[in-house]
């Protein structure tokens, strides 16, 4: 299944991830947790996009459902694991209902339908003030206990929460990996390639897509359920459609034809984002040297790191067609071939 | 033609399809005998492809019935009709372009072995799946192509993959829509030989539409001539080539 190099990369990464808390500063550990959770979110999105060929623009709805349900329960002193479980189930149940309707269409119609459903969920979260806190969201989510008797963790600390996230995310990724490499996963790819042919091979394509939608929703719910206790807040922005574009960007950046593509994309994206946020002063200096820019804009030094992020993402996406991971792999194979030819 | 009830695989009775006022298929009735190769011929617009779409469940008939081994299949969804035992090809070759030849066939085998809800087995390590794929690759003679992505194959080889996908479903009846369309003479000959060979090897019943009359006379034991949605004539090759009416509508002489 894997070649030796891939096994080594996987083993080293997992080992490294478990050892990181000894080396990294709390800030970097927070960053790493964010990468893990957003990576899982992007992977769950790619089950629909890369494998099934369905572009969802409303995937944030399931992330937010997980985040709000878990956040609400934990805030009302439920054990964390119970909150996570409830968050996953709530997201999966929502995906069962909305997915049933969404998979009746495909291509751009599917994208628009998921976008509309996503905004419905956003509106509900924004308006249902008694439960969700409206525009403020649910704040002050502090984990008091894990939910396993006998195990007490200082979950307020970053490293304990990091380990919990790491274990659950690695398990979820393994689950997704098995699903995508199972007979079911092969049929998903076939439905992406030619849904009509698959129907005439005897497969109920709509049911297949529906199940994929529920699985993707549940996984996004897990990422969200881990997100709100980590951020200690569940705010309505994570339900907004603009948040749904994050996994889209990450996945395209990393490469949607590879299982690990969204993970690579999430790492790059979040890494760039934080690097820009802390270093945007340099960019402003550089911009100030450009002749055509109005002085007032440069002097204001607005918080425009998104602009720079866009400027950096553009060459990355244009320069690595098929995603960074696929391009790196291709480069590696090319080098290898050159070397074996010269010998 | 001998027609004993027990030998009939497919029985089409009074099948009619209207498209907003146009009667594309008009009161068509015929039976297919087990293990025979039957060809449907007729000029463009005669209703051949519509007939296929009605049998395979792609379209719902306005009226009439289709029975596969005495079981009514009108009203079933296409995937259930496949599961009942009818496999079909399309006029424009229909495959899974970015998957390999072996994967294309494996998709069909997964369907046949009802493993669509297996979320856990590693598909490359499933023995019974991959053995069945190997058998089909050998039967069609495309073992050498197994690991090639199908979008890199020639048109002729793609048609072989499509036939392999259908065979992997182990159907009792195979509907082929213009299997030699757009092929060179050699490629067409290869397909004709393959179909004859497969009929011998599997005992499947074949229904074939075809423009090339040479292919038809070479292959079919029985021919159905359609014209303007109706069956003009059904008989063996001799009867069809001798019929002045067929010459008039089909050959234009």
Image (cartoon, coloured by chain):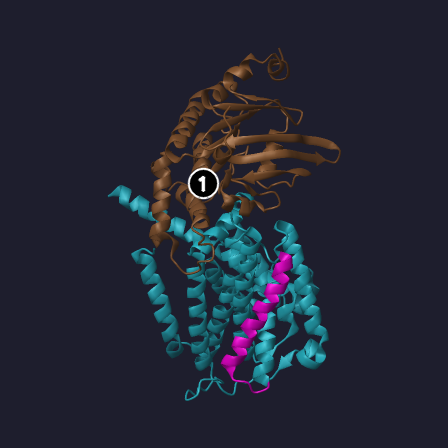
Chain colours: A cyan, B brown
In this rendering, does residue B181 appear at all?
no
Find residue A153 and report its horizontal and vertical position in percent. Answer: 44, 86
| Depth order, front residue of B67/B174 | B67
Q: Residue at x 42, y 56 (%)?
A: A182
Q: Residue at x 56, y 55 (%)?
A: A207
Element at badge 1? Answer: helix
Horizontally, residue B164 falls left or right of residue B25, namely left
Total residue callouts: 1
Q: Note whether A214 is above or below A107 in the view shown.
A: below
Q: Note whether B43 is above or below A120 in the view shown.
A: above
Task: List the single residue furthest toward the left.
Answer: A343
* Residue beneath disc 1: B165
Task: List the single residue furthest toward the right.
Answer: B21
| Depth order, front residue of A324/A143 | A143
Q: Quadrant of residue B30?
A: top right
Residue span colored magenta: A76-102
| Depth order, front residue of A175/A224 | A175
Horizontally, residue A289 falls left or right of residue B166, namely right
Q: Note whether A106 is above or below A42 in the view shown.
A: above
Horizontally, residue A334 falls left or right of residue A310, namely left
Horizontally, residue A6 falls left or right of residue A237, namely left
Q: Residue at x 46, y 38 (%)?
A: B172
Look at the magenta stretch and give its main secondary structure: helix
The quadrant of the image that shows the C terminus of chain B is top right
Task: List the single residue furthest toward the top.
Answer: B253
In this rendering, does residue B74 appear at all?
yes
Find residue A294 and report its horizontal and vertical position in percent. Answer: 69, 60
Bin the neighbour count of mark 1 within 10 Å (Cα to Cα): few under 14, some 14-19, many 20 and up: many
Find residue A158 and report its horizontal and vertical position in percent. Answer: 47, 81
Magenta-colored stretch includes residue A114: no
Find residue A70 and report its horizontal and vertical position in percent. Answer: 57, 78
What chain does badge 1 belong to?
B
């Amino acid at each position: 299944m894997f070649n030796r190099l891939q096994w080594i990369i996987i083993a080293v990464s997992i080992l490294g991830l478990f050892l990181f808390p000894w080396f990294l500063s709390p800030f970097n550990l927070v960053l790493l947790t964010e990468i893990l959770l957003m990576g899982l979110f992007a992977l769950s999105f790619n089950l629909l996009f890369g494998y099934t060929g369905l572009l969802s623009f409303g995937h944030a709805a399931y992330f937010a459902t997980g985040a709000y349900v878990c956040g609400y329960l934990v805030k009302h002193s439920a054990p964390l694991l119970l909150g996570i479980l409830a968050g996953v189930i709530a997201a999966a149940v929502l995906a069962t209902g909305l997915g049933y309707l969404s998979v009746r269409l495909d291509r751009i119609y599917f994208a628009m339908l998921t976008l509309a459903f996503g905004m419905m969920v956003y509106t509900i979260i924004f308006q249902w003030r008694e439960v969700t806190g409206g525009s403020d969201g649910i704040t002050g989510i502090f984990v008091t206990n894990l939910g396993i008797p006998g195990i007490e963790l200082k979950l307020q600390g970053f490293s304990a929460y990091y380990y919990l996230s790491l274990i659950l995310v690695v398990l979820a990724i393994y689950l997704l990996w098995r699903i995508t490499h199972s007979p079911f996963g092969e049929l998903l790819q076939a439905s992406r390639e030619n849904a009509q042919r698959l129907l005439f091979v005897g497969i109920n394509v709509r049911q297949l897509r529906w199940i994929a939608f529920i699985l993707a929703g549940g996984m996004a719910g897990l990422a969200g359920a881990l997100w709100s206790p980590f951020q200690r807040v569940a705010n309505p922005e994570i339900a907004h459609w603009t948040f749904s574009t994050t996994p889209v960007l990450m996945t395209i950046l990393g490469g949607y034809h590879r299982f690990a593509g969204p993970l690579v994309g999430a790492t790059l994206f979040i890494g760039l984002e934080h690097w820009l946020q802390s270093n945007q002063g340099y960019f402003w200096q550089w911009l100030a040297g450009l002749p055509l820019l109005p002085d007032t804009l440069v002097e204001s030094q607005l918080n425009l790191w998104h602009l720079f992020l866009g400027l950096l993402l553009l060459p990355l996406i244009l320069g690595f067609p098929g995603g960074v991971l696929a391009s790196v792999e291709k480069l590696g194979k090319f080098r290898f071939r050159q070397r074996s030819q010269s010998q | 033609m001998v027609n004993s009830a027990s030998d009939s695989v497919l029985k089409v009775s009074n099948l009619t399809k209207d498209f907003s006022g146009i009667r594309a298929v008009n009161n068509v009735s015929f039976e297919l005998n087990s293990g025979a190769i039957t060809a449907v011929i007729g000029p463009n617009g005669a209703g051949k492809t519509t007939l296929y779409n009605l049998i395979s469940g792609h379209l719902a008939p306005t009226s009439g019935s289709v029975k596969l081994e005495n079981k009514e299949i009108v009203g079933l969804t296409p995937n259930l009709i496949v599961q009942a035992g009818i496999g079909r090809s399309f006029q424009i070759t229909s495959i899974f372009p970015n998957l390999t030849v072996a994967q294309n066939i494996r998709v069909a085998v997964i369907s046949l072995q009802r493993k669509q809800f297996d979320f856990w087995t590693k598909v490359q390590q499933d023995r019974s799946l991959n053995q069945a794929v190997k058998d089909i690759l050998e039967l069609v003679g495309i073992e050498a192509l197994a690991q090639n992505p199908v979008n890199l194959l020639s048109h002729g080889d793609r048609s072989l993959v499509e036939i392999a996908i259908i065979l992997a479903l182990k159907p009792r009846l195979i509907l082929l829509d213009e299997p030699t369309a757009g092929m060179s003479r050699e490629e067409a000959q290869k397909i004709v030989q393959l179909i004859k060979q497969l009929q011998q090897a599997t005992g499947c019943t074949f229904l074939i539409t075809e423009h090339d009359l040479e292919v038809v006379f070479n292959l079919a034991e029985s021919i159905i001539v359609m014209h303007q949605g109706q069956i003009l004539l059904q008989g063996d090759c001799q009867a069809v080539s001798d019929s002045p009416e067929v010459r008039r509508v089909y050959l234009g002489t």
